[in-house]
Image (cartoon, rainbow, N blue to C red):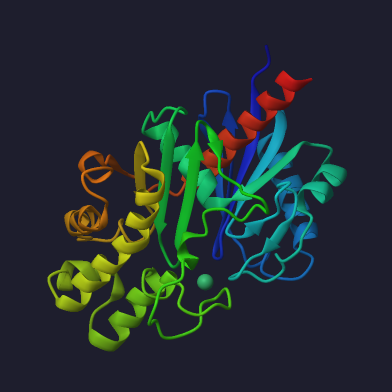
Amino acid sequence: MEKEYILGIDVGGTNIRAGLVDESYQLTEFVIESSAQIVDKQDATDNLTEFVKNYLKAHAREKKVIGISIGFPSTIDKARKTVLSTPNIKGLDNVEVVDVLEEKLGISTFIDKDVNMLMLCDMYNGSIPDNGVTVGFYLGTGLGNAICIDGELLIGKNGASAELGHIPSRDVDGICGCGNKSCVELFASGKQLKYLCDTHFPDSFIGDIFKEHAQDLVIKKFIHDLAIPVATEINILDPDYIIIGGGLPQMDGFPKKQLEDAIHEFARKPYPEQNLSFSYSEPLQENGVIGAGIYGMKQIRRKRRQS
Ligand SMILES: [Zn+2]
């Protein structure tokens, strides 16, 4: 039978990545382009449509592409058809991506949160089974979170599950990007790390902050604070698998042991504390595209089973 592919796309604030993912989740024809010309402006769906058309022309001429699957750094509606809001990118608020792309291109289209796509890739890489509860913590500029229960990503009543960064806390200064006060993301995220770097270590390059200052009290407290939302979710869900990814753990000298110790400190005893299973995301820029491909392939298989 002719080989089938999903066009996986990972939309980020700086770059948009794309590639073809086959049935055994192998990636080919991987490309990276600047997001500025494609999303970050009005009429993002027109530009996205053009991007897909050009990609297919250049990379998939002789190939059978059965679906398009896109991860966005956004909140997505319950039906997984509309991108509701994207804090860091212009032109991606209330955009009906699925309907527009399907109408213009005639190819089944799927969208979800970027961290959900990332976790599907991490689960595949780590041979994590569908059965059970897997949670992913993506510690980057913000605090991303994905939850998968028996192979189903948790979506919630409105599509807004797993907004872990917006758990309220007490005594936090400032207003979160979401508009609320006291969200944990205000102290447990890369934004806070940048603030600490600027105010306490102005002579250090942020990329070297853990290498140079991991033993400093300010950084130790930051790592300790990162563990608060992570342990909160662990205490609620008692997950089988815990994946930690994102930009922060990939930084030089990131104190993984300190973070794990702090998570153990906050976790409920004796369980889940005595049986935590951590794994770390492999830092590859293809992950979001492969994850989107896996997501699309699973959706197509489900559609076929139903019909
Ligand atoms: Zn918030």
Name the quadrant containing residue 12: bottom right
Compared with residue 162, is residue 133 higher up or lower down, i.e. above or below? above
Residue 88 drawn at (x, y percent): 58, 71
Residue 289 drawn at (x, y percent): 54, 43
In the rendered image, the quadrant that contains the C terminus is: top right
Note whether residue 294 is visible: yes
Depth order, front residue of 176/237: 237
Total number of numbered labels?
0
In the rendered image, the quadrant that contains the N terminus is: top right
Note whether residue 202 is visible: no
Compared with residue 105, is residue 183 higher up or lower down, i.e. above or below? below
* 131 on left or right of 86: left
Which residue is the extreme one toward the right? 103
Looking at the image, which residue is at 61% across and 60% down?
74
Residue 145 drawn at (x, y percent): 47, 54
Residue 78 drawn at (x, y percent): 70, 50
* 35 on left or right of 147: right
Compared with residue 299, is residue 249 higher up or lower down, i.e. above or below? below
Depth order, front residue of 98/84: 84
Which residue is the extreme one toward the left? 215
Looking at the image, which residue is at 72% across and 68% down?
91
Compared with residue 177, is residue 74 higher up or lower down, i.e. above or below? above
Depth order, front residue of 157/62: 157
